[in-house]
């Protein structure tokens, strides 16, 4: 039986008996996709959202995603390839690290596309509007639909390279430099130090 292209909800076959069973299941799945929240405790490793429609799918059958747990490094949240969808996400992990939302195929390590790094703002209370980001995935690229305001400084770990993951407006520092993310995944730095 075929299904819808993004949510994978089963279509009703023209010669199918008990069409109401398929229709009711489809209504339930659509309801879940528009209202469910997935809460996941990160285990300090990358996490791939399960995707097995129409049976189950963390990615397709949830709208809000809250990630908690202790991180020691930035970690990836891997979205299924080919699925066009909105994601409302909150990084409530501890350790001050970013969650990087990206698309990967199960058979290859990475699909080259836009990714989004969601900072940990150090706030762990649910339903605080500033803690949630709205992302859109077109099946390959992840695009932030919410942006930082110019007066909202987000401090993150110092980037390793000028093309490290980052969102425009993020700031970082180490013993030698002050870093500013001026565009998605592009960092500039200025030397700091000296005496006064």
Image (cartoon, grey):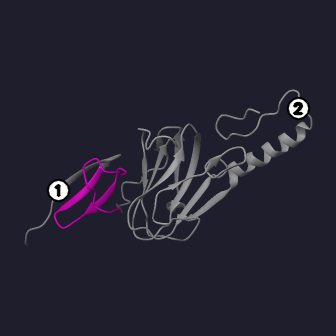
Disc 2 from disc 1: Cα separation: 67 Å
Task: Judge whether residue 144 can be spotted in this image.
Answer: no
Q: Which residue is mark 1?
A: 190
In this picture, residue 171 sits left or right of residue 97: left
Q: Quadrant of residue 39?
A: bottom right
The reply to whether dot 2 and dot 1 touch (C-beta < 8 Å) is: no
Residue at 58%, 57% (x, y): give it.
65
Where does the image place residue 71, in percent across and percent down from the top left? 43, 67
- The answer to if 179 sits in the magenta stretch is yes
From the viewer's perspective, is residue 121 above or below residue 89?
below
Residue situated furthest left in the rendering: 195
Residue situated furthest top in the rendering: 14
Q: Quadrant of residue 84?
A: top right
Part of the protein shown in magenta:
155-181
- The answer to if 69 sits in the magenta stretch is no
Q: Which residue is mark 2?
A: 16
From the viewer's perspective, is residue 17 above or below residue 127?
above
10 Å neighbourhood of mark 2: few (<14), some, or many (≥20)?
few
Choose the circle earlier in sequence order: 2 or 1. 2
Q: Secondary structure at mark 1?
A: strand
Residue at 72%, 35% (x, y): give it.
3
- Assign the magenta stretch its main secondary structure: loop
Where does the image place residue 143, in percent across and percent down from the top left? 47, 43
């Amino acid at each position: 039986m075929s299904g819808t292209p993004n949510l994978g909800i089963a279509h009703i076959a023209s010669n199918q008996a008990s069409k109401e069973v398929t229709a009711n299941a489809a209504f339930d799945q659509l309801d879940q996709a528009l209202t469910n929240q997935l809460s996941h405790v990160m285990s300090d490793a990358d996490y791939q959202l399960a995707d097995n429609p129409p049976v189950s799918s963390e990615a397709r059958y949830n709208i809000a995603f809250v990630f908690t747990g202790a991180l020691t490094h930035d970690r990836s949240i891997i979205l299924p390839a080919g699925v066009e969808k909105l994601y409302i996400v909150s990084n409530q992990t501890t350790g001050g690290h970013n969650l990087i939302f990206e698309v990967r195929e199960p058979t290859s390590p990475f699909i080259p596309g836009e990714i989004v790094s969601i900072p940990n703002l150090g706030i762990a209370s649910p339903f605080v509007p500033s803690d949630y980001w709205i992302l859109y995935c077109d099946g390959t690229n992840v695009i932030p639909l919410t942006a930082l305001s110019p007066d909202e400084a987000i401090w993150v770990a110092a980037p390793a390279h000028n093309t490290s993951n980052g969102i425009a407006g993020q700031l970082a520092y180490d013993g030698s430099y002050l870093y500013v993310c001026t565009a998605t995944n592009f960092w500039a730095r200025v030397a700091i130090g000296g005496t006064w």
